[in-house]
Image (cartoon, grey):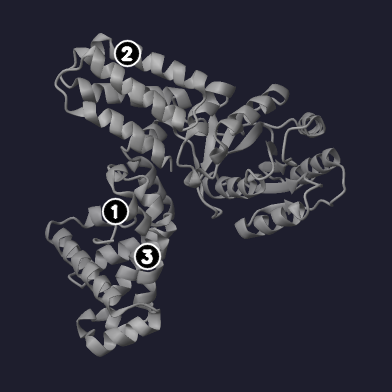
Amino acid sequence: MFENLTERLGGALNRLRGRGRLTDDNVRESLREVRVALLEADVALPVVKVFIDRVRERAVGQDVLKSLTPGQELIRVVRDELTALMGESGEGLALNVQPPAVVLVAGLQGAGKTTTVAKLARWLKEQQKKKVMVASCDVYRPAAIDQLRTLASQVEVSFFPSQAGGAPVKIAEAAIIAARQGFFDVLILDTAGRLHIDEKMMDEVRRIHAASSPAETLFVVDSMAGQDAVNVAKVFDEVLPLTGVILTKADGDARGGAALSVRHVTGKPIKFIGSGEKSDAIEPFHPDRMASRILGMGDVLSLIEEAEKKVDKDKAAKLAKKISKGKGFDLEDFADQLREMRKMGGLGGMLDKLPGMAKMPQGVKSQMNDRELIRLEAIVNSMTPKERRFPAVIKGSRKRRIAAGSGTQVQDVNRLLKQFTQMQKMMKRMRKRGGMANLMRGMGGGMPPGL
């Protein structure tokens, strides 16, 4: 996510990190590089100007030039200003109204709007313990209603049936009545998107808004559209009282221009960010954490929260108990850890949040993906129960059989066994140091050595 921006900003600022003294020339040169990096990331020009002016004002102040570590202090200033640019602190959904709280979702066609409705519904159900209904007011796009019905079934929330060719305002009104009668906490209305902004579209979404009086009016933005997305959001905000923005497809956006521009240009907070196709690939937007990620400092707090939500605590407790009693860590346990990592978004999702990963060569990063986890799991699944419990028996002929059964090479099996041995040693060390409580806390965050 935002790899190009991270690389360029990191290069400009790292040259200052170890300096014992900063001069006006140092600061001016670095800010020139930062300015170019932001413009190349498709950040709006007025936003870049405001950002650079703020950083320059603080950089020539006493808090930086008089600091014992001025280079690091300037990096902190840049991080603080990036955070301020994106909204200081995360803003949640304001759903404290008489149920059902209506959430109206708008946006252009192709931004991932309907998928985002399903993701948001799942997040509200699982994280906020809300009873959720979704309804489609998109009577124009072929199969739009069927798509939402299918997605609602997958994330296990209620779907209000509507018909193609119906009146969108009538559908919204009927859905609200049904949600009220069914004692639903939240009703999410998916509105029709267009390939471009037109007056008919704007008038329709205005009428749906007037009829539904939503607690939240969210605009879905494709982050890969960069400055164009921000301009569209601004037009929508002029005709519709938006309360927030959801950025989608952030995992495919190497630039980050939309994330850095949309709050400043529209004045509306980014409330969620979508970063994948899976129904759980959405997270609340935290400007301070995103600023740290952009500067290559990682986002450990989000990683911990992800582990707490998705790691099987019972399995972690059983493994900790097993190892504390002196029983060995076997390949079945190793496979369980691979599955837990996949639940947390795989290697790619974890790497994005680990500090220092921005410095890793792109070629190495590209090899660390879910395919590697799936391949390792396939190798373990090709073993017999005895081989999983007693890996020492896996010799030449067994290795060939396992490789053939998993569609891999013998050297792949050897590599897995080496990684497993390293992890086994790590588990033994943790037991000797009395670190079982730490082991339980870190089961989801641990990465098999050598991956």
Between 313 and 280, the one lying in front of the other is 280
Q: Secondary structure at mark 3?
A: helix
Q: Position of residue 32 (x, y in %)?
A: 35, 21
Q: Quadrant of residue 170?
A: top right
Q: Which residue is mark 3?
A: 372
Q: Which mark is residue 58?
A: 2
Between 200 and 446, the one lying in front of the other is 200
Dot 3 amino acid type: Glu
Dot 1 amino acid type: Gly
Earlier residue among tags 1 and 2: 2
Q: Is residue 94 above or below residue 387?
A: above
Q: Quadrant of residue 312?
A: bottom left
Q: Is residue 181 above or below residue 9?
A: below
State the residue at coordinates (28%, 25%). 75
Q: Secondary structure at mark 1?
A: helix
What is the spatial separation of the Cα atoms under label 3 and label 2, in whole angstroms? 45 Å
State the residue at coordinates (20%, 63%). 427
Q: Quadrant of residue 188?
A: top right
State the residue at coordinates (39%, 79%). 406
Q: Position of residue 291 (x, y in %)?
A: 39, 32
In contact (CB < 8 Å): disc 1 and disc 2: no
Dot 2 amino acid type: Arg
Q: Which mark is residue 442?
A: 1
Residue count near mark 2 (Cα–Cα under 10 Å), binned few <14, some 14–19, many ≥20: some
Residue count near mark 3 (Cα–Cα under 10 Å), binned few <14, some 14–19, many ≥20: some
Earlier residue among tags 3 and 1: 3
Q: Is residue 242 above or below residue 402?
A: above
In contact (CB < 8 Å): disc 3 and disc 2: no
State the residue at coordinates (83%, 41%). 168
Q: Could you tell me which quadrant the N terminus lies in?
A: top left
